[in-house]
Image: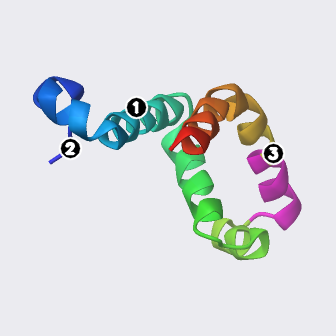
Amino acid sequence: MRLCRTKVPDEYLNHHPELESAIDARLILEQLQRMVTPEEWALLLAVAASFSYEELAVAGSVTAGSIRIRVFRLRRALRPIAQEILDWLVVV
């Protein structure tokens, strides 16, 4: 079950402010995911899971250079929204 702000009582959020921050981060991640295709999101998840560009290139039958370029362009496009996530992590 995923938490929504509407399902969490306010008095609980008052005692657990980190929960509200986690909900906000989840919403930002969902917004990022909607901005890219499912294939692009899978690529970002694979990079985040520490797969090397070479491993991803073999799996996708492309060159490691093309994977690097795709990831660079995705990061550049998503960076403004991703910065909000980083700001949240610094606060927590």
- Magenta stretch: includes residue 91: no
Identify the magenta region. Answer: 62-71
Is disc 3 placed on a helix, strand or loop? helix
Q: Can the viewer see residue 74?
A: yes
Residue 64 rendering spot, x and y as whole percentages: 83, 66
Query: What is the crowding at mark 1: few (fewer than 14 residues within 10 Å), some, or many (at least 20)?
Result: some
Q: Residue at x 47, y 31 (%)?
A: 28
Distance from disc 1 to disc 3, alpha carbons, whole Å, reads 25 Å
Residue 43 rendering spot, x and y as whole percentages: 61, 55
Residue 42 rendering spot, x and y as whole percentages: 53, 54
Q: Is residue 67 above or below residue 6?
A: below
Q: Can the viewer see residue 8?
A: no
Q: Is residue 44 above or below residue 5?
A: below
Distance from disc 1 to disc 2, alpha carbons, whole Å, reads 12 Å
Residue 19 rendering spot, x and y as whole percentages: 30, 41
Residue type, numbered disc 1: Asp
Comparing 46 with 39, the one in front is 46
Left or right, 32 with respect to 18, comes to: right
Query: What is the crowding at mark 3: few (fewer than 14 residues within 10 Å), some, or many (at least 20)?
Result: few
Q: Residue at x 53, y 37 (%)?
A: 37
Q: Which label number is shown at residue 24? A: 1
Residue type, numbered disc 2: Arg
Residue type, numbered disc 3: Phe
Left or right, 20 with respect to 91, comes to: left
Q: Which residue is mark 2?
A: 2
